[in-house]
Amino acid sequence: MTYFQTVNREVFPLANNTLNEIAFEQMADKFTKMIVDHTPVAYVIMDKEHNIVYANNYVLDLTGYHRDDLIGLKCYDIINHGTPCQYCAVRETFCTGKRAKILKEELDKFGNPIYNELISVPILNEDGSFDYVMEIVIGKTEEVSLRKKKEKDFLKLVETLSYVLETRDTYTGDHSNNVKKISLLIAEEMRLSDLEKQKLFIAANLHDIGKVGIKDSILNKNGSLTDEEYEIIKSHPVMGSKILSNIESFDNIKDIVLYLHVRYGGRGNPDGEKREDIPFLARIISIADTFDAMTTTRSYRKALAIEHAREELLRNRGTQFDPELVGLFVSMIDTG
């Protein structure tokens, strides 16, 4: 029984009981094949060796192949110059027996990136086994390009908010940029995912956003702060978290900002927070934030030497900072 006949028995169960068996199969098979052949979505059927046994007209239009030349080729001969794809929905379906879906970036004949969603479905026999997989290819280039543009615009917004801080406090603006760079260097060293790096980028840029609610007379004061003024400055992570909580896109950022100055060892934390309460990315930014603060000239003191800042980080590992992250960062300092 062909794939189309199997589908048609599911689509036309009543017709199967009333029409002549042969007439039904011929009519339904022709009807379904006509739909699949002319739909503006790519359909390809492959065997276990990834040899193409069927491709609809849309595939022929996309690839420029004649059907007789396409049948028998392996799918990756066409889209990957003969090299099996690293991530393959068809291979996953043959391994698991289940439907698989991936979003794949490829290059068109002009070298421009295009994006396709690949969905593979096993073509089951009556006993549940299968020898063929159908892959459906849906173009997603326009959708992905729009999403990337939105992400780019969003990150520009983040940098703009950081710039707003800089206009009020030159130190804070430079500091946020430095903290971002240091945090991302640590992320690279740890080989964090692109998603985690993006969160770090946002949180580091906005980690001092709560300072917008602090008076200029305190924020830019020359000389030492009073105890009361120091408590106001210390409240900026809470204020920053509240600001970010009003924007849904910052849901996964606000806690990083909130816990930025919570001590890893727990001692002295106002609400009894413990190390497991501190988001991992907040621990990274905490080290970057402190290191840059120590090595930057402030209104009340000159910049400390890098060696002095290094020793301070080591002295407070396990109490104020995550000890493993301190060890990693100090080794980065020592290797330049």
Image (cartoon, rainbow, N blue to C red):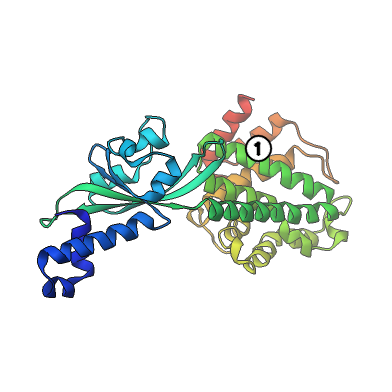
Using the rendered view, name the quadrant where residue 214 is placed: bottom right
Tell me if 139 is positioned left or right of 221 in this view.
Answer: left
Residue, x 43% and y 40% (percent of image)? 64
Residue 105 lies, in percent from the top left, at 48, 43
Tell me if 166 is positioned left or right of 70 in this view.
Answer: right
Tell me if 227 is positioned left or right of 158 in this view.
Answer: right
Which residue is the site of mark 1?
312
| Residue projecting furthest to the top | 335
**Above or below for 189 versus 147:** above
Whether residue 10 is visible here, answered yes or no, is: yes
Q: Which sits in the foreground, 124 or 22?
A: 22
Residue, x 58% and y 38% (percent of image)? 186
Q: Quadrant of the C terminus?
A: top right
Q: The residue under label 1 is which amino acid type?
A: Glu
Q: Which sits in the foreground, 222 or 258?
A: 258
Using the rendered view, name the quadrant where residue 248 is placed: bottom right
Residue 252 lies, in percent from the top left, at 55, 59
**Above or below for 267 versus 330:** below
Q: Which sits in the foreground, 329 or 113?
A: 113
Whether residue 261 is visible here, answered yes or no, is: no
Using the rendered view, name the quadrant where residue 38 is placed: bottom left
